[in-house]
């Protein structure tokens, strides 16, 4: 088993403001980790002395998410692994659940849906599946993604998701094709839903978003539309203080005063109606019953869209001990930073 101890520093330009308890994505492949055993043995620290540990989730041999207590524009991360230590229990102090303690849903789509459920990394209710097929788990934007086929896939649902006040939802999507009003995700009772919508250009489209059917809005955007067929795009929706905000790739593109959402009847993805089902890839679906600032949303996009730029180059951390000011009474041997020797 390979071992290692490496560090990287965030790119200052990617963090427009300090973020508290920020779950940062790390691509373990860039550190030279090649086996699941190595990945599960990873421990993450704030310093080279390993005095301050951070919670992390190991999703796969390549995908890790780390809860950075204070993500500043100069913060560094120290990652240590030995290939021997077991993964933390999900409820441990530095385990998976601690990374997502304030989230309701975090869906990496890391579990093959043919097993009957899609893992919820918060430790909450998993998404159940009706007819997802083996092979629906494919390479995504961040690790794996779910390939939703509008004619074959069923309706996943998490019956515990419920928001009646401030909330934020985020997701990556890559449409294969878009039908009229293709449901991406939303509440089982139809409130707080998000729809991809066709435009005059068959290769692109826009999106409906809102807290109710009558309060949805269609954001204005430039170019080919909010999304383009075959292209990954990150979307975020905030509802706070009576206003809904929609973001594309970390930047706000629309806002509208919207009524308070009704109680959710459970989170759903796509639709069992073949006329309204989403067809394409979906990745990193997250919901939280709290606000996330515009700077948070921008930082998250920067991290997930270009992880190699965000964290830059990983360098080995030296574990050598520097010997200073060793004095032997008698022969008076002094080694000052191992630069000079007086007496013997």
Image (tube, rainbow, N blue to C red):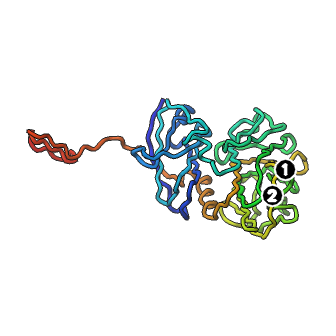
**Residue ID at (85%, 45%):** 150
CB contact under 8 Å: marks 2 and 1: no
Vertical placement of residue 60 versus 69, above or below: above
Near-viewer residue (173 or 334): 334
**What is the number of the mark on residue 55?**
none
**In this rendering, would 150 be left or right of 125?**
right
**In this rendering, would 61 be left or right of 110?**
left
Q: Secondary structure at mark 2?
A: loop
Near-viewer residue (87 or 300): 87
**Residue ID at (73%, 68%):** 241
In percent of width and height, residue 338 lies at 21, 44
Q: Alpha carbon of mark 2 to alpha carbon of mark 1: how far?
A: 9 Å
State which quadrant residue 27 falls in.
top right
How many numbered markers are drawn? 2
In percent of width and height, residue 240 lies at 72, 65
In percent of width and height, residue 288 lies at 69, 54
Packing grade of label 1 (10 A; few <14, some 14-19, many >=20) is many
Quarter of the rendering occupied by the C terminus: top left
**In this rendering, would 313 be left or right of 303?**
left
**What is the number of the mark on residue 192?**
2
* Residue 232 showing in the rendered view: no
**Would you name the residue on which mark 1 appears?**
188
State which quadrant residue 14 falls in.
bottom right
Q: Secondary structure at mark 1?
A: loop
**Residue ID at (79%, 39%):** 128
* Residue 227 showing in the rendered view: yes
Q: Residue furthest bottom?
A: 257
In percent of width and height, residue 291 lies at 67, 61
Packing grade of label 2 (10 A; few <14, some 14-19, many >=20) is many
């Amino acid at each position: 088993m390979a071992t290692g101890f490496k560090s990287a520093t965030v790119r200052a330009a990617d963090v427009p403001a300090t973020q508290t308890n920020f779950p940062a994505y790390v691509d373990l492949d860039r550190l030279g980790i090649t086996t699941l055993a190595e990945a599960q043995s990873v421990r993450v620290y704030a310093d080279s002395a390993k005095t301050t540990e951070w919670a992390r989730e190991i999703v796969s041999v390549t995908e890790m998410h780390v809860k950075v207590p204070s993500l500043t524009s100069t913060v560094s991360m120290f990652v240590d692994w030995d290939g021997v230590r077991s993964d933390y229990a999900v409820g441990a102090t530095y385990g998976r659940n601690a990374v997502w303690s304030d989230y309701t849903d975090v869906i990496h789509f890391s579990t093959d849906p043919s097993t009957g459920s899609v893992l919820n990394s918060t430790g909450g209710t998993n998404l159940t599946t009706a007819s997802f097929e083996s092979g629906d788990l494919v390479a995504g934007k961040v690790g794996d993604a779910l390939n939703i086929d509008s004619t074959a896939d069923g309706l996943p649902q998490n019956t515990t998701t419920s928001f009646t006040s401030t909330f934020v939802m985020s997701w990556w999507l890559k449409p294969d094709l878009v039908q009229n009003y293709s449901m991406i995700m939303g509440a089982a009772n139809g409130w707080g839903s998000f729809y991809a919508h066709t435009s005059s250009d068959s290769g692109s489209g826009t999106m409906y978003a809102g807290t109710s059917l009558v309060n949805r809005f269609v954001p204005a955007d430039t170019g080919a539309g909010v999304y383009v067929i075959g292209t990954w795009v990150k979307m975020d929706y905030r509802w706070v203080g009576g206003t809904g905000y929609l973001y594309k790739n970390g930047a706000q593109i629309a806002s509208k005063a919207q009524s308070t959402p009704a109680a959710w009847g459970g989170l759903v993805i796509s639709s069992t109606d073949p006329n309204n089902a989403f067809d394409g890839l979906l990745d990193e679906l997250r919901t939280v019953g709290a606000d996330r600032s515009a700077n948070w949303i921008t930082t998250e996009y920067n991290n997930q869209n270009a992880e190699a730029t965000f964290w830059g180059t990983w360098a080995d951390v030296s574990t050598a001990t520097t010997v200073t000011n060793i004095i032997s009474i008698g022969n008076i041997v002094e080694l000052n930073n191992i630069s000079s020797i007086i007496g013997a």
